[in-house]
Image (tube, rainbow, N blue to C red):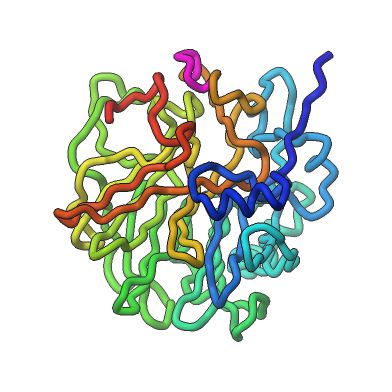
Amino acid sequence: MTQTVIQGAMPHDEIRSGLESHDRALHIKDGWMRDPYIILHDGYFYLTGTTPNRDDPREKTDYYNAGLTNAINQKEARISIVGQHIRLWRSADLVEWEYLGEPFNLEMGYWAETEPEAFESDDTTHWHLWAPELHRVDGKWVYVHTSPGPYRRGANFAICNRDTLTGPFTHPMGETMLGKHDPSIFTDDDGTSYLLWGNTLIAPIKPDFSGFAADPVRIDPSGSRPDPRNPGQMTSRIGHEGATIRKIGDKYVHFGTAWSTDGMRRGTYNMYYCVADKITGPYGPRQFAGRFLGHGTPFQDKQGRWWCTAFYNSNVEPISREEALQPWVGENAYTINEQGVTIVPLDVRVLDDGEIYIRAKDPAYANPGPEEAQQF
């Protein structure tokens, strides 16, 4: 029987060399994690993501658990490894990471306060904490996350009451977070903060965080393409989850996540983008940012260079870069990313005409695969 060979994070010297050259993907951290999110604040890179509970033995014994029941081998009942905590690390250099513990968990959230009976049941397997993000909003630390529990409850917007990463927390958005899949926050130059969620709705947040200052609007790329989920119909969506916004130059760049075939868990988990002059659009055509970068975080290092986080999301163990060029990749969910946190350098440019160009620099991430549904 073939034994799984787990590839650990790169040696520190190799990571430092790659950080300097900014030309290749770097596997910077071990450990089971999806949706890695990195933010730079006051000289430190803070890292969080979808994780198991601390000391869950399956992090070692079921290393390639995709986080989804039955995701890797449909003949085995594989239970999601995703836990109920936000776990947090920080680093001054993206090489050595300090563990900061678990500052927030679902029992500290709004829904645990309003529906405590859900947390008193023995069956809490549906209360998973997914895709957490850490933001600075109006001088405060804010956690957002999704949690696909009953009736899509579980998403939280938790504000730290003091200038620390720990509680006590307040939840002024309250019921507004109901059903908000993959929430993310963008704060504009004028201080206005927006909540994004789903694929993709956006709304400005009131200054006191008590709700939305205007009705949500949907933002999509211009143009359309065939929708494999609905034969004979067209779609214009950027993806299905993992949306975020960055301002580059004077443009708003809307990033979204989709499988390369536009079918669920078929092909590779990629990142796409579109660009607008106003945050609510209209946005230009859907463009390709990078392969295997789905639900990654575009972020800048201390030199202002752009990177994107990447992670393992597959139904099988990672394949080689050469195998990823084969047409059969469209038949299942595949990745070249190892379990843990990988960061991939991005070529981000403001062109002479003011338009934005974004593309992964590592050749294995830079181009669509042969199975890509849309032609770029």
Residue 216 relative to residue 122: left or right: left
Write the residue at 56% across / 53% down: 19
The image shows residue 157 at horizontal and vertical percentages of: 52, 68
The image shows residue 213 at horizontal and vertical percentages of: 31, 74
The image shows residue 297 at horizontal and vertical percentages of: 49, 53
Residue 71 appears in the figure: yes
The residue furthest bottom is: 162
Residue 165 relative to residue 287: left or right: right
Residue 233 relative to residue 316: left or right: left
342 and 55: which is toward the camera:
342
Write the residue at 52% across / 50% down: 21
Q: Quadrant of the N terminus?
A: top right
198, above or below 114, in the image: above
340 and 121: which is toward the camera:
340
Q: Quadrant of the C terminus?
A: top left
181, above or below 78, in the image: below
The image shows residue 150 at horizontal and vertical percentages of: 58, 49
Write the residue at 57% across / 48% down: 18
Residue 148 appears in the figure: no
355 and 272: which is toward the camera:
355
Write the residue at 85% across / 44% down: 57
Q: In the image, which residues are magenta? A: 324-329
Residue 212 lies in the magenta stretch: no
Count of labels shown? 0
Q: Main secondary structure of the magenta part?
A: helix
6, above or below 303, in the image: above
Residue 325 lies in the magenta stretch: yes
